[in-house]
Image: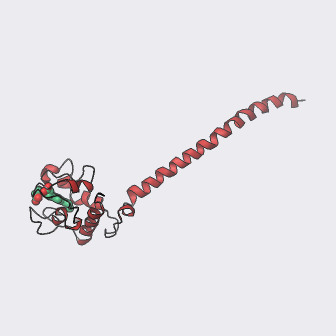
Amino acid sequence: MSFPPLAPVLDLFANPSAARRPYRAPLATLFAAALLATTAGCAGGLDEPERFTGASSCAPGTTASSIIQAQCYSCHSTETKASGGGFDLQAAGLPGRLYTTNATCNSQPLADSANPSQSFFLKKLTPSPGCGGQMPLGGSLNAADTACLTEWLVAGKPSP
Ligand code: HEC
C-alpha cells in the first residue's frame, strides 16, 4: 500500500506551483510589455528617423546624422572643433540649436526661423556662402546630401 504516503508528497509539489502561478503570469506580461515598448522605441527612434522628420530626399541608407558624421566630424566634432572654427556639430541639440546660435563668421543666426531654407548653415554648403569657405572645407556635398540636410534643418525648426 504505497498510496497514502505518496499523497502528502504530491500535495507538497502541487501547493508551491499553484501558489507561484498567479504571480508568474503578470510578471511575464509586464516583461513582454516592457520588451515591446523598448523594441518599438529603438526601431522608430534610431533606425528610421525619417519617419519622424518627414525627410525623403536623403539617398538610400543615409540620414542627416550619418552625412554630418561622415562629412563634417573631421573638423566639427566635439573633439575636432578647433580645426572647424570652434563650431561643434556633435554636441546635443541639433538641429534646434542652430536656430538659437549666431555664426562666428558673420554674427547672423546659423538657422533662420523666418526662412529656414535660406539659412546661413545651408549657404555654407554652396560655393559662395557670403562668409568663409564652402563646406565641407576643400570639397562639396552632392545634391542628395545637400537636399537631405536642407530638409533636416527645415523640419527641425523649433515650434514657437
Ligand atoms: C576640413 C575641415 C572642415 C570640414 C570637413 C568641414 N568644415 Fe565647416 N568649417 C571649417 C572651418 C575652418 C570653418 C571656419 C572658417 C569658415 O567659416 O570658412 C568652418 C565653418 C563652418 C560653419 C560656420 C560656423 C560659424 O559659426 O561661422 C558652418 C555652418 C560649417 N562649417 C558647416 C560645416 C558642415 C555642415 C560640414 C559638413 C558638411 C563642414 N562644415 C565640414 C572646417 C571644416
Q: Is residue 13 above or below residue 82?
A: above
- Judging depth in this view, the residue of 120 and 124 nearest the camera is 120
**Quadrant position of ligand 1:** bottom left
Q: Is residue 72 left or right of residue 10?
A: left
Q: Does the image show residue 102?
A: yes
Q: Does the image show residue 2?
A: no
Residue drawn at (56%, 45%) of the image: 30
Q: Is residue 97 above or below residue 151?
A: above
The colour mode here is: secondary structure
User: Which residue reaches farthest right?
Assistant: 1
Residue 148, image x and y in percent?
A: 28, 67
Residue 137, image x and y in percent?
A: 13, 61
- Judging depth in this view, the residue of 12 and 51 nearest the camera is 51
Residue drawn at (26%, 55%) of the image: 96
Q: Is residue 137 above or below residue 91?
A: below
Residue drawn at (27%, 64%) of the image: 154
Residue 8, image x and y in percent?
A: 80, 29
Residue 156, image x and y in percent?
A: 29, 60
Residue 106, by quadrant, is: bottom left
User: Which residue reaches farthest bottom?
Assistant: 143
